[in-house]
Image (tube, rainbow, N blue to C red):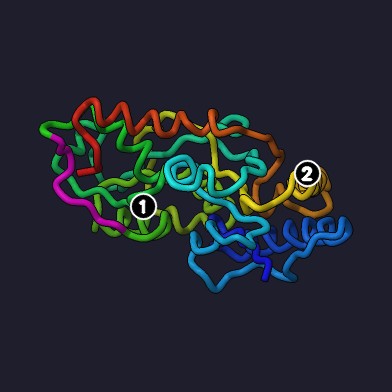
Amino acid sequence: MACASLAMYDMLAPVSRGNDTLWHFVRDRLRDAGFAAPEELERQSSHDALWPQSDLILAQTCGYPYITKLKGKVRLVATPIYQFAGGRGTERLSYVVVSVASSYRTLADLRGKTVALNDRGSNSGMNLLRAAVAPLAQDGHFFSDVLVTGGHHASLAAVAAGHADVAAVDTVTFGLLQRHAPESLAGIRVLQSTDSGPGLPLITSLNASDEMVGVLRKALSEAVATSSLGLADDLGMIGIEYLTDSDYARLDSYRLQAEKLGYPVIA
């Protein structure tokens, strides 16, 4: 049975509403073109469970797992453009965040501290931070402890509560929280930004035909351009671009740079 998921930013009521609005628009255009499409988004599975499914119609993934694990197993559809600070066009960076009560002024001040990671496979939470820390690492280490939280929200909470000293957070997540739940950023300040890379791509099954990919792209572009849908307000989504594997390869180049500096994993 065909499936679809937009789970990557689906953490607040306005965002869930926007994701539903976007999907219903795309779903109806797919059906009008003769393609099967599920009635609603899948929200029971983990955020990554549907990525490799052969009946996947649409999902959003992280750019780093795309280029390291999914390339050649799914098809790129489009990459959204968001209106939040921390990026231009499809380019997004991460914010390195610490507690407002801390005295840290530079990344070097965090040597020997505890870092919170949303996921060890994350581009925004791990890969870009690893690249930033690698020049400062000694014998493959920089932090004293790594706390894997399972999500950016949890990483922010860990820093605010003092369970971790630092985390790297996707700037779309940060922007959505500033807009819809600013209280969740209380106690947090941005220390610095990382380098940037292409943002989270929308994907479909490797089995998807060129015709279906074309319908998906047209529907997504039309949805973003339809101001009455409120996607800019709910999702911060203001455009769509079509990137290639070579665009996303830059994310893996950050891994290679870190490895050359003797820092293959966050530690």
Q: Is residue 158 left or right of residue 70?
A: left
Image quadrant containing the N terminus: bottom right
**Front residue of 200 and 67:** 67
Dot 1 amino acid type: Gly
- Residue at 30% of width from left, 37% of height from top? 130
Give, as a three-letter code, the residue at label 2: Gly
Q: Which residue is mark 2?
A: 214
Q: Is residue 225 left or right of residue 194?
A: right
Give above or below for 218 relative to 11.
Answer: above
Q: Give the x, y percent position of residue 90.
A: 60, 34
Dividing the picture into quadrants, the one containing residue 267 is top left
Q: In the structure shown, which secondary structural element does the residue marked by tag 2 occupy?
A: helix
Q: Give how far apart the Cα atoms at labels 2 and 1 are.
A: 45 Å
Q: Position of residue 114 (x, y in %)?
A: 20, 49
- 58 vs 148, nearest the viewer: 58
Between 44 and 105, which is closer to the camera in this rendering?
44
Q: How many other residues sit within 10 Å of disc 2, few (<14), some (14-19) or many (≥20)?
A: few
Which residue is farthest right?
32
Q: Dot 1 lies on which element? A: loop
Q: Quadrant of residue 111?
A: top left
Residue at image coords 38%, 46%: 125
Q: Which mark is residue 187?
A: 1
Badge 1 crowding class, 10 Å Cα cut-off, few under 14, some 14 to 19, many 20 or more, is some
Of tags 2 and 1, the one toward the viewer is 2
Q: From which residue to which does the magenta span run? A: 140-148
Which residue is at a point 33% across and 59% down the rendered structure image?
149
